[in-house]
Each structure stands twice: as C-alpha cells, then as structure tokens.
C-alpha cells in the first residue's frame, strides 16, 4: 500500500476547501433525494479522494478508502469536530430540501413519519 506525501498538509487543505453543503447532496437515479446525508467521515473520504486524484494518483477505490481511513485516524479531535459540524450542516440542508419537495404519496404511514420528524426537530 502506498503512503501519500505530507498527509497533514493535504488534510489541512481539505478543511479549507469545503464545498457548500448543497453540493454534497446528490439525487438518486430516479430523481429522489437521498434518505440520509453523508456522515463526516464519508464527506472527508470523498474530499480526500478528489484531492489525491487531482494530484495525479490513480488507484482502486478501496485503496483510496484505506488511505483516507488512516488519515482520518491521524487527525486531531478538533479537526474531526469541525468535520462533524460540517456534516451536521449538510444534514440540515438535506432536511430543508426535503421539506420543500412536494409529497405526492399521502398515506397514514407518511403522516406518522412527518409527525415523528417534526417532534425530533
């Protein structure tokens, strides 16, 4: 397995180049919004992989994931806390987008789900 050069420099650049939360929410093939937002680590991993690919690294996804996992484990707790806050903002953005989307399937099950979601917020 390879070790990317200067993990700490690469990681600090990732944190300063965070895209808007809306850019991390991708629609499914059928046009629906995802049911869950990506976790902080998934966001970190995707940004890490993009950064490595932009620097010319070409490996299988599982190799990128393994390297991103090692880099995540080496990060400070403050760094991880910032990513978790960012993940929370992505989650809130997704929730806001879901509220804007009209619901065509009105059923008792959907009404109960909405009531539970509103009780949680």
Image (cartoon, grey):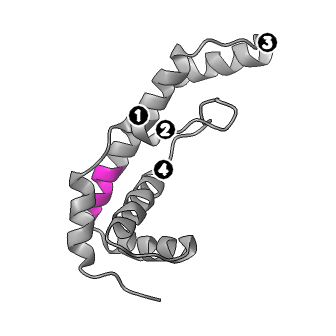
Residue 39 disc label: 4
**CB-based contact (under 8 Å), mark 2 and mark 1:** yes
Instruction: Of the two numbered discs 3 and 4 on the same chain, state the one appearing first in sequence.
Output: 4
Which of discs 2 and 3 lies nearer the camera? The answer is 2
Question: What residue is disc 1 on?
Answer: 22
Instruction: Of the two numbered discs 2 and 3 on the same chain, state the one appearing first in sequence.
Output: 2
The alpha-carbon separation of the residues under discs 2 and 4 comes to 12 Å
Q: Residue at x 50, y 47 (%)?
A: 38
CA neighbours of label 1 inside 10 A, class few (<14), some (14 to 19), many (20+): few
Residue interval drawn in magenta? 77-83
Which of discs 2 and 4 lies nearer the camera? The answer is 2
**CB-based contact (under 8 Å), mark 3 and mark 4:** no
- Asked if residue 117 lies in the magenta stretch, the reply is no
Residue 25 disc label: 2
Q: In the image, is residue 87 above or below residue 102? A: below
Where disc 2 sits, the SS reads loop
Q: Is residue 12 left or right of residue 107?
A: left
The alpha-carbon separation of the residues under discs 4 and 1 comes to 14 Å
Instruction: Of the two numbered discs 2 and 4 on the same chain, state the one appearing first in sequence.
Output: 2
Q: Residue at x 37, y 64 (%)?
A: 48
Which of discs 4 and 1 lies nearer the camera? The answer is 1
Residue 98: horizontal and vertical position, in percent? Answer: 55, 22
The alpha-carbon separation of the residues under discs 3 and 4 comes to 30 Å
CA neighbours of label 2 inside 10 A, class few (<14), some (14 to 19), many (20+): some
Q: Is residue 85 left or right of residue 29?
A: left
Residue 113: horizontal and vertical position, in percent? Answer: 68, 21
Q: Is residue 121 visible?
A: no
Q: In the image, is residue 19 above or below residue 55? A: above
Residue 80 disc label: none
Residue 44 lies in quadrant? bottom left
């Amino acid at each position: 397995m390879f070790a990317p050069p200067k993990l700490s420099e690469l990681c600090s650049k990732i944190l300063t180049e965070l895209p808007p939360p809306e850019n991390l929410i991708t629609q499914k093939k059928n046009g629906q919004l995802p049911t869950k937002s990506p976790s902080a680590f998934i966001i970190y991993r995707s940004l890490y992989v993009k950064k490595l690919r932009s620097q010319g690294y070409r490996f299988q996804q599982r190799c990128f994931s393994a390297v991103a996992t090692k880099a995540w484990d080496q990060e400070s707790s403050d760094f991880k806390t910032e990513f978790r806050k960012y993940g929370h903002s992505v989650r809130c953005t997704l929730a806001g987008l879901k509220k804007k989307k009209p619901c065509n399937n009105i059923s008792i099950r959907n009404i109960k789900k909405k009531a539970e979601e509103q009780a949680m917020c």
